[in-house]
Amino acid sequence: MANEGYIEANRLNWDDRARLHARGSTGYRLDRFRDDRALLSDVVDFDRQYLGDIAGLRAVHLQCHIGTDTLSLARLGADVVGLDQSEASLDAARELFASVDTPGTFVESNVYDAVDALGGEQFDLVYTGVGALNWLPDIARWGEVCAALVKPGGRFHLRECHPIAYALDDTMSADETDAGLRLKYPYFETVEPLTFDEADTYVDTAGEQLTNTRSHEWNHGIGEVFTALTSAGLTVTTLEEHRRLDWRMLPNQIERDELFFLPDHQIDRCPMMYTMAATKPS
């Protein structure tokens, strides 16, 4: 497979992230899910308005990381399978599920190999959460995988950082950003990735840093994502853009209830996230 070296580097990077994200009271604060057996992740709590009633549905969560969103889908009544290429992520997810006596299945696989890894099973709901697509080099191939996993009459759901937000210059100071937003990175999918070498991750890790610091990312325009799904046979039913972001991307963003917004004079200038949902004809 082309891009194997980039994908392997990302796997090692995410193994490191998973170990830090799952520790103690830092990172994803997994103890919250153990202490409150009804708690939903912020991601799924937002998405449930689009998901509707999923009780009894067979669901697969692609790129599930350490399982907080997967667990939240289970708490809404779904019969869940989580898939991720990071063994460390899946170890943490299995431990989380076991600690709260929740059934769930976890499969180690690159998302492009998901159809074979899942034995050709098709699902009522194929779910992809936040911060997933930027790690994938080929969005058209991803769309084919997603469509293959949705059973006839089933549904697909995605919420992701908006590609125009990913294209913004995140190296500007707060004052510079406050004066005006500026593009720095590609909006469209490129052959070569954007390569970053960063020892920090996106949540609090009490000063601990990554060992495998190099990662590779690709942006994918809204049209490219839409076309990837529709060309593979899905019917897009929802496309909605949001002003919020689940993490701080720009230094002048304002935090409200653990979510991040551009200041009032910029909030209508740029979408920060989007939701896309689709169905597969029966």
Image (cartoon, rainbow, N blue to C red):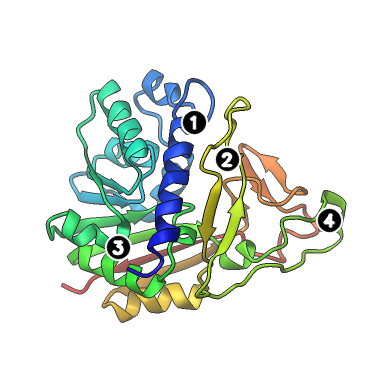
Tell me the quadrant of the picture where the N terminus can be found.
bottom left
Say what secondary structure mark 4 lies in.
helix
Q: Amino acid at mark 3?
A: Tyr
Q: Residue 178 bears which disc, if any?
A: 4
In depth, the one of 259 and 28 nearer the eye is 28
Residue 36, picture quadrant: top left
Q: Amino acid at mark 2?
A: Thr
Dot 4 or dot 3: first in sequence order is 3
> Dot 3: few (<14), some (14–19), or many (≥20) neighbours within 10 Å?
some
Q: Is residue 39 above or below residue 240?
A: above
Q: Is residue 216 left or right of residue 112?
A: right
Asked if the residue under mark 4 is in contact with the one under mark 1, i.e. CB atoms within 8 Å, the reply is no
Say what secondary structure mark 1 lies in.
helix
Dot 1 or dot 3: first in sequence order is 1
Residue 143, picture quadrant: bottom left
Could you tell me how far apart the alpha carbons at marks 2 and 1 are, in whole angstroms? Answer: 9 Å
- Write down the residue under mark 1: 20
Nearer mark to the viewer, of 4 and 3: 3
Residue 282: x and y, percent? Answer: 15, 72
- Write down the residue under mark 2: 201
> Dot 4: few (<14), some (14–19), or many (≥20) neighbours within 10 Å?
some
Which residue is pictured at 43% across the width and 72% down the height?
A: 225
Q: Amino acid at mark 1?
A: Leu
Residue 147: x and y, percent? Answer: 26, 69
> Dot 1: few (<14), some (14–19), or many (≥20) neighbours within 10 Å?
many
Dot 2 or dot 3: first in sequence order is 3
